[in-house]
Image (spheres, rainbow, N blue to C red):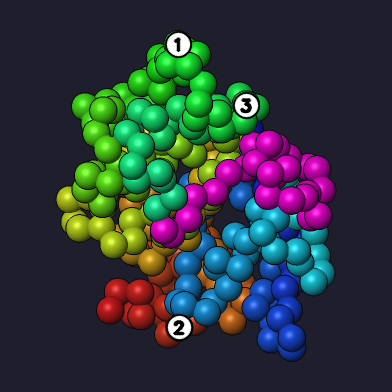
Amino acid sequence: MADETILETRGLTKEFRGFMAVSGVDLRVRRGAIHALIGPNGAGKTTVFNLLTGFLQPTAGAILFNGADITRDRPAQTARRGMVRSFQISATFPHLTVLENVRVALQRERGDSFRFWRSDRMLDGLNQRAMQLLEAVDLAPFADTLTVEMPYGRKRALELTTTLALDPELMLLDEPTQGMGHEDVGRAVELIRKVAANRTILMVEHNMSVVADLCHTITVLQHGAILAEGAYAEVSNNPAVLEAYVGTAHD
């Protein structure tokens, strides 16, 4: 299973009015791996994420998830297949409690509508699973805290928890440590490692220390195309990468 490909792109291309944002990307993500996309702003990382999850349609190429062609899937279809993404900006309900945020996500995973007017008795049926998820990411003590009152790093952990509530097979994390202080970054790294124990992670990340610590495979993008790929030791010693990215990423 370790060498099985869970996600593959073939010649993935996206053109915007003559600008080639993504150009012929052939990407393979192994099942069970933590795989990073790196590169400076404008390299095409977020565009690749948007293509993979159906928020953008490619100009050319194909996307395969578990061997099925999902190139023309819409975002909801992609999520139902088991590929779910987080965003750079925290996407939680600020005036709901931490527990209530997770319950909303569990309603979606169960196929229910967002029925905020449901009786407490019906919603309380989700509490046990919600608390299990919160305990898994060390947020159980914050269950009754309004999300708006949470520290930034904990809000990002909550976002990861709501993503986990959908029980994804593949998680796409867009800059999971962006804006975090040193302590929060360390906590986020351990959290990502923990949730990756039984799923696959594809992440965009600028923090090279995080990438070096977590990731099995790194794909380097330059001008929308793959410049290099491999383990951190290999990529970080690639002359082209050293010239184009590693120095920038450490600045």
Badge 3 element: loop
Q: Amino acid at mark 1?
A: Arg
Label 2 vs label 1, nearer the camera: 1
Mark 3: give few (<14), some (14-19) or many (20+) Cα within 10 Å: few
Residue 83 position within the rendered picture, expressed as x and y whole percent measured from the top left: 62, 42
Residue located beneath label 1 in the image: 121
Q: Is residue 75 magenta?
A: yes
Residue 142 position within the rendered picture, expressed as x and y whole percent measured from the top left: 24, 31
In front of the other: 212 or 119: 119
Q: Quadrant of residue 221?
A: bottom right
Residue located beneath label 3 in the image: 112
Q: Is residue 204 magenta?
A: no
Per the rendered image, the range of residues in magenta is 66-89
Residue 178 position within the rendered picture, expressed as x and y whole percent measured from the top left: 34, 61
Where is 199 relative to 20, above or below? Answer: above
Label 1 vs label 3, nearer the camera: 1
Q: Amino acid at mark 3?
A: Asp
In front of the other: 32 or 195: 195
Badge 2 element: helix
Where is 17 relative to 178, above or below? Answer: below
Cα–Cα span, label 2 and label 1 = 57 Å
Residue 226, labelled with which disc? Answer: none
Where is 5 relative to 211, above or below? Answer: above
Q: Quadrant of the image for the C terminus?
A: bottom left
Q: Earlier in the sequence, mark 2 or mark 1?
A: 1
Task: Report whether residue 8 is seen.
Answer: no
Residue 158 position within the rendered picture, expressed as x and y whole percent measured from the top left: 36, 40
Mark 1: give few (<14), some (14-19) or many (20+) Cα within 10 Å: few
Residue located beneath label 2 in the image: 244
Q: Amino acid at mark 2?
A: Ala
Cα–Cα span, label 2 and label 3 = 47 Å
